[in-house]
């Protein structure tokens, strides 16, 4: 089932998929975006928004600035994952590219 929130996510990441910079994957039983096999991002599973993997310090900073929220499925906080509930095309693009650099560095 595609929700309005996940449709926004997939529309936004379509250029990354089309260019081959990222690929479809799954995580925790749901669809996600991967780079070189590493998790990058997914639509938020409980409503609108982006969940993206970033350095822990960046996640902490965005939460402190009120631009994102912690991601805590089943009550466990994932410290390198940021939930951004509001759609801001430029902010999402910036976070996705930053996340691509981060996860690519982890996979080497």
Image (cartoon, rainbow, N blue to C red):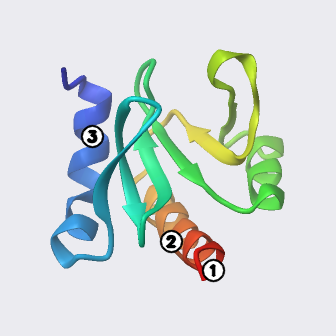
What is the CA distance from the residue labelled 3 to the residue labelled 1?
A: 27 Å
Give the number of marks: 3
Q: Is residue 36 left or right of residue 72?
A: left
Q: Please tell me the numbered disc located at residue 8.
A: 3
Q: Are marks 2 and 3 in contact (CB under 8 Å)?
A: no
- Give the CA distance from mark 2 to mark 1: 8 Å
Pointer 1: what residue? 105
Q: Position of residue 48 (x, y in %)?
A: 40, 27
Give the foreground label among 3 and 1.
Answer: 1
**Neighbour tally class for label 2: few under 14, some 14-19, many 20 plus, Cα within 10 Å:** many
Density class for disc 1 (Cα within 10 Å; few <14, some 14-19, many ≥20) is few
Q: Nearer the viewer, mark 2 or mark 3?
A: 2
State the image coordinates of residue 70 (x, y, percent, origin top left): 71, 34
Count residues near mark 3 (Cα–Cα under 10 Å), then give few for <14, some for 14-19, many for 20+.
Answer: some
Mark 2 or 1, closer to the camera:
1
At 51% from the left and 58% from the top, the residue drawn is 91
* Image vertical order of residue 30 relative to residue 51, above or below: above
Closer to the chain start, of discs 2 and 3, is: 3
* Mark 3, secondary structure of its residue: helix
Q: Which residue is mark 2?
A: 100
Position of residue 102 relative to residue 54, above or below, is: below
Location of residue 34 in the rendering, given as x and y in whole percent from the top left corner: 40, 60
Instruction: Locate residue 40, reporting x and y percent.
Output: 49, 58
Q: Is residue 58 left or right of residue 98?
A: right
* 99 sits to left or right of 37: right
């Amino acid at each position: 089932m595609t929700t309005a929130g996940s449709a926004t996510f997939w529309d936004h990441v379509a250029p990354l998929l089309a260019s081959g910079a990222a690929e479809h994957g799954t995580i925790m039983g749901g669809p996600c975006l991967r780079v070189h096999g590493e998790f990058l991002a997914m639509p938020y599973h409980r409503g609108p928004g982006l969940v993206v993997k970033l350095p822990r310090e960046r996640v902490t900073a965005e939460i402190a600035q009120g631009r994102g929220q912690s991601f805590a499925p089943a009550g466990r906080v994932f410290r390198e994952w940021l939930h951004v509930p509001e759609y801001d095309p430029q902010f999402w693009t910036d976070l996705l590219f930053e996340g691509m650099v981060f996860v690519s560095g982890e996979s080497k």
